[in-house]
Amino acid sequence: MPEPAGRAAPIRLLVVDDHPIVRDGLRGMFSGDPRFTVVGEAGDGAAAVDLARALHPDVILMDLRMPRMDGVAAIRRLAGLGCPARVVVLTTYDTDADILPAIEAGATGYLLKDAPREDLVRAVEAAARGEAVLSPAVAARLLHRVRTPDEPLSRRELEVLELVANGATNREAAARLFISEATVKTHLLHIYEKLGVNDRAAAVAAAYRRGLLPRAPG
């Protein structure tokens, strides 16, 4: 049935999150608003890509950390397929290691799950118009990132990180470098801060991505 004259068609929304209770909450929130139509929901990135191709949503609300295919991989895949849907990341994670890959993959927006309902509604409407939408906390991090050049890792920090990448524990790294275990922990905290990550695995991944660590041959 055609829309009444003077009234825009509802924004077609696809909800993607691996937690059913989150999907239910988002569906309930948007389904009760005539400005939106929830056309589908998915529990992982692979299903999201399939549904986006079949349902042609205007906006996709995309979680980041999901099984099978995470949000960044799904965003990248959608961009590669030429999918015109705007993707707004909706997540609890606000580190540089989460934000930057999502934006680089093609996300139109990045919001945190503690955003007020009104902010989320406005963000989806703005994304549907092709506007970039960022939560204040995420915008602040990106501005800081742009204004503050990457601080290089010290030689000692690189030594610690290379040992960690090769599977060494803090105690083993301390023994290899003839320093205390507490000093290794301090170096790791500085590494996390400089790379914008929260744990060892993310630090190693970020270091490989930036070319700070040599990759194993082959």
Image (tube, rainbow, N blue to C red):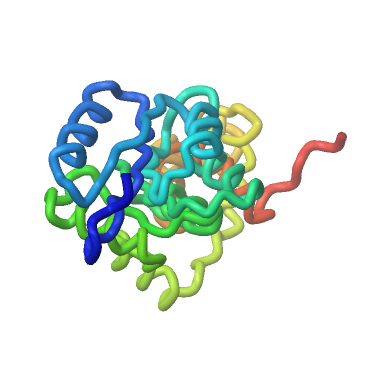
- Farthest residue, direction bottom: 147
Is residue 210 shown above or below 198?
A: below
Whether residue 166 is visible, yes or no, is yes
Residue 47 in percent (x, y) is at 50, 27
Q: In x, y percent, where is residue 142?
A: 38, 66
Left or right: where 144 falls relative to 118:
right
The residue under the point 13% across, 39% down is 32
Please name whichever residue, 113 or 164, is drawn nearer the observer in this view of the structure.
Answer: 113
Residue situated in front as seen by the camera: 173 or 34 = 34
Find residue 3 and report its horizontal and vertical position in percent: 28, 53
At a point 36% along the width and 65% down the height, the residue shown is: 129
| Above or below 34: residue 134 | below
Query: Would you identify the image quadrant in which residue 108 lies?
Result: bottom left
Mark count: 0
Q: Is residue 70 visible?
A: no
Front residue of 10/128: it is 10
Q: Quarter of the image containing the N terminus?
A: top left
Instruction: Answer with the quarter of the image where residue 145 lies.
Output: bottom left
Q: Is residue 33 above or below residue 131?
A: above
Q: In this view, does 156 lie to the left or right of 110?
A: right
**At x 28% / y 51%, what residue is drawn?**
10
Q: Residue furthest right?
A: 218
Rendered location of residue 44, percent (x, y): 45, 27
Question: Residue, x 50% and y 40% (percent of image)?
Answer: 202
Q: In which quarter of the image is the C terminus?
A: top right
